[in-house]
Image (cartoon, helix red, strand yellow):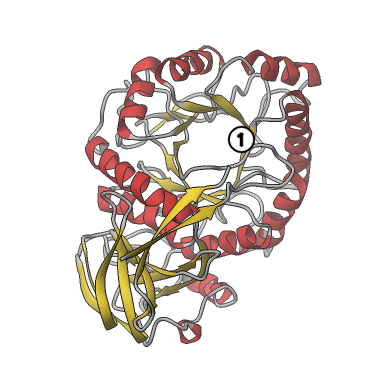
Amino acid sequence: MKHIIYRRNPLGHRRFKWKQRDFALSTFNCIGEDVELSIRNCKEVGFNLVEVGWGRRDKVWKTVEACEKYGVDLIFQDLTLFSGMMHNHDDRPVDDNTIRRTVNKLKEKKHTIGFFVWDEPYCDYLFKEARRESDIMLESNPDVLLFSVFPPSYNPGPTWDNGMYYEAFEQYIKELEPPVLSMDYYPIGDYCGLYPGLVYTDEKQLDDSPMWLDLAVARNLARKYDLPLWFYYQACGVYNTEKLTFPMVRMMMYAGVLYGAKGLQSYTATGVIHVPSDGKPYPTKETVLIATGEKGEFFNEQKKIHKEFRMLGNTLMALKNRAVYHSEDLCIYGKYGEIYKGFKDNIANSKILAGQLPVRTSVGELYDDYGNEYLFVLNRDFEKELSADIPLSGNYSVYEVSRKDGKQRLIYENTEKLNVSLPCGDAVLFRLQPSEAEKFTVEYMLDD
């Protein structure tokens, strides 16, 4: 069978030298009690990037050295020197020279590739301060990644309730001009009461979660401003989470990819994180790593899925998201569902799919720059396997992109439906072409 190699380009904002070359697998706060052990285990589990979000003083600098030792790329943050978390930060404004000294000091560190400029800025004065600090960093080192993340719609500032969320999200992009568009959402819990009446239950799962609304908005804005989308997924217990299983974590990772994410960021790999304002432990469930930095209960499963993403990542980096379709049982809570209708993709407009999707099934339509069409199929159910047929609009040849080696294999020469069998919270990537067309497999190569 014919095999075609296509070129793909690095991704990122035009004002930066830094560009994203490979699919990012990151974690927000990687600092356990034993810093070196934490980094060693982060590397073993498959993170290709770690962050020291909310970091302070000695442990941050120990993390820098551990990342050099083990060859793990790092996004640096020390809240005593620069940056902030939402409106919580140390004395401001930061002296310009403090920022310059920090950046210059870290120039010699091969694996400190960037700086965590601000965690969840949400209003004008925070945007301006974050931009001021990032401009100084960029002037001091033009090669760095200047990272920030916009908050979810449950936050103390712009929300869907006050009608300011979309406008603030877009203002954030215009003011900061970030190299990647990162957003976060942690739906397993009670949202600390920020969505009155909305609480996660095993019966509803995420059928009514506004997470899907926030993801749709982030996808649209990333597409509008030509930025790679990164997504923080929930990997530990927050907001009074009573139960967290790995199929839940896996589904949230794949939910990001469904909307075109080119980076997945764990919140968080370590079992204990700290709140910047008071430094007290914030209670979480132990996940990939426990508080000491030793391996936790999800370590082996996280290692397995990271290996799969390393195989899929080259293809995912070459693809763009056209649309996301959900089964009809996804019905977002309350008035947020009405807002979602303005961002929802209608399956009736699909040229590939026909009819409705099986229960708790979502499909992303993806494509590359060369006219190749893909479907990313997700089983949203945490508890039940999916075994169903997905009707297609015509006769197609179908190739599955292997999670074992990244290669494409022809599984149907001529079919009008996709027979899909997926474990709880799992997903699969297919490439489709009209059945009468010449058969060929596809591979992508990074164009430097």
Q: Residue at x 51, y 71 (%)?
A: 371
Q: Nearer the viewer, residue 281 or 316?
A: 316
Q: Is residue 221 visible?
A: yes
Point out the residue furthest to the front here: 2
Q: Residue at x 79, y 34 (%)?
A: 132
Residue labelled with disc 1: 85
- Image position of 57 with respect to 232: above or below: above
On the image, which quarter does residue 394 sit in? bottom left
> Residue 357: x and y, percent?
34, 79
Q: Is residue 245 visible?
A: no
> Residue 109: x and y, percent?
57, 17
Q: Nearer the viewer, residue 223 or 417?
A: 417
Q: Nearer the viewer, residue 293 or 370?
A: 370
| Amino acid type indicated by mark 1 | Met
Q: Nearer the viewer, residue 62 or 304?
A: 304
Left or right, 8 with respect to 18, comes to left
On the image, which quarter does residue 283 sit in? top left
- Image position of 429 with respect to 35: above or below: below
Indicate the quadrant containing the C terminus: top left, top right, bottom left or bottom right.
Answer: top right
> Residue 191: x and y, percent?
46, 52
- Is the residue marked by circle 1 packed among few (<14), some (14-19), or many (20+) residues within 10 Å? many
Q: Residue at x 36, y 36 (%)?
A: 284
